[in-house]
Image (cartoon, rainbow, N blue to C red):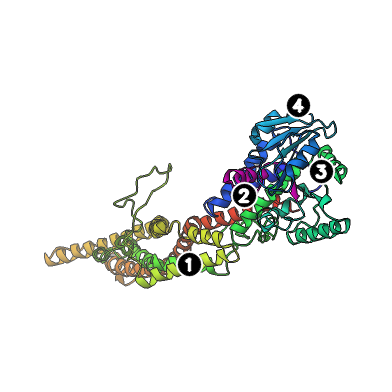
Amino acid sequence: MKLLRRKEGPSLDTRVSALLEAATLGDGRLPEEAVTAARAVAERAGARAGLSLDHTVAALAGATGSGKSSLYNALAGQELAAVGVTRPTTSTAQAALWDGEGAGPLLDWLDVPHRHSAADADGSGLVLLDLPDHDSIRLSHRLEVDRLVELVDLLVWVVDPQKYADAALHERYLRPLAGHRDVMLVVLNQVDRLPPQAVERCVGDLRRLLEGDGLADVPVLAVSARTGEGMAGLREVLGKRVAARASWAARLGADVAAAAAHLGAAEGGSGGGGEGGGEVPALEQGSGRGLEKGPGKGLGKGVDKGLREALARAAGVPLVVEAVAKGHRHRAVVATGWPVTRWLRRFRPDPLRRLRLGMTAVQNARPQLPSPGDAEIVGRTSVPGASAVQRAQVETALRDVGESAATGLPGPWATAVRHAVRSHATELMDAVDRAIATTSLDATRRPRWWSAVNALQWLVFAAMLAGALWLGVLFGMDYLRLPQPPLPTAGPVPWPTVLLAGGALAGVLVALLSRLLAWLGGRRRARRTGRALRTAIAEVSDRLVLEPVRAELDRHARFTEALRLARAEV
């Protein structure tokens, strides 16, 4: 696609692409009418840029009796259009061509079937259209004018001294097309009916009206198609516009800017009112208003932390942390306690198993393919469900995240951000529960010293048992009056007594020391598990809450940047 490039600012093809991107990004967020109109402009720009760029299509538009057809005939140098006085005589547009070779596809795209070759030799590349009256009593005439006004490269508005202030012309066409001032001319026709001094006053008044329409820089030419007054100046202006071969690009650029302004206005005021007015507000540095990778960046201070804390309380993290400490001590006693009494501990339930934490399988597991080597634990634990107060705290935290992220955004985007916050709300608590179940696997890992202490306990117990058996044999021999064998001693105390008493005492001391170590280890493991659980909950909240918000803010940032490019703002 051949497109004109400017010395400054983005090229036309970049602007068209940016407008199409803005429309795509705004789809589902902005009103469908604005999005559809922007896409239509982008498609129209692509179609026009693919047709003859050596021809400039100028349209003569005006009200009934303004003398459009007379002006058309005068410019063409022959009687091509029927001329009426008070009633519309042009029902469909017709074209006069100056060197029309290659203009056929362009006129086919414009859907102008009536084509003539102009007798005037000057103006090579000009395609001049005579449009129906924009104030015609026939609806088909007005619709034809509206259609072609959107397509032509250069607009020549023809007015007469009696109706140049017509509100229909200014409010329906001129004022909405204020952004197209570079591709517009205003011709005051029939000046031969006015005294010379009246012509100047009439032109001055017309310029004042155009300034009110935002068209202060639009050329105003006073002509008379009947006498030829001012026609040379009009031909000169048209000739320069055609020779520059730039009107088509200026027209498309104005269309793109207008569509971008319409999109901006549709999102709630960022595009300003009217065509080409207003400014798109600059985003804070970084995509997504600074909501960069990582939980909570760009949100209000402490908002993401509040969400994590609310989820932790609702998911029973304090209860799980307490169960980890108690479970660690429970299993430590079972593994390292005095063998004489440790079996009693087995009658007490394991706090973690009671919560279904640290188990290798759970019922109602979600079917999915586990990664090689991963122990998969999915589904619900038996941690008590969140209370009404805790659920309300989670709802409040989600609302705070949404409000913080939506601050400063236009209405539609703010609504989209709030919706993104709650897009995964139904699965949030289940995902947190699965994260807790998976993370608590480490809470059941047996420390290595338990095995060493367990072996020591059984060794001490064996020594105690050996001492008890030895003493039992000695007691039996004494009861049977058998001769006593030599009895080794440790000082004054016999070895059987040392083994029995020492083994019992050593077993109790090792058990007490193990309990102390288990208590310290339980606290340390509980703290570590608490941190791991909160990290897992942060990952869940980031994935299900903050990531959707981050994506929506990034979408708005790209939308704003696309609007800026489409409007050629540098």
Helix, strand, or loop for circle 4? loop
Q: Are marks 1 and 3 in contact (CB under 8 Å)?
A: no
Q: Residue at x 83, y 35 (%)?
A: 123
Query: Was residue 353 drawn as part of the magenta stretch in this picture?
Result: no
Q: Which residue is mark 4?
A: 101
In this view of the protein, can residue 436 be seen by the observer? Answer: no
Q: Residue 267 at what x, y percent from top left?
A: 59, 58
Dot 2 or dot 1, earlier in sequence: 2
Locate residue 94: give its quadrant.
top right
Q: Amino acid at mark 2?
A: Ala
Q: Which residue is mark 3?
A: 226
Q: Which residue is mark 2?
A: 22
Q: Is residue 557 above or below residue 109?
A: below
Q: Is residue 250 left or right of residue 542?
A: right
Q: Amino acid at mark 3?
A: Arg
Dot 1 or dot 3, earlier in sequence: 3
Q: Amino acid at mark 4?
A: Glu
Residue 399's disc is: 1
Q: Nearer the viewer, residue 52 or 116?
A: 116
Q: Are marks 3 and 2 in contact (CB under 8 Å)?
A: no
Q: Are marks 4 and 2 in contact (CB under 8 Å)?
A: no
Helix, strand, or loop for circle 2? helix
Residue furthest left in the image? 480
Marks 1/3: CA–CA distance: 72 Å
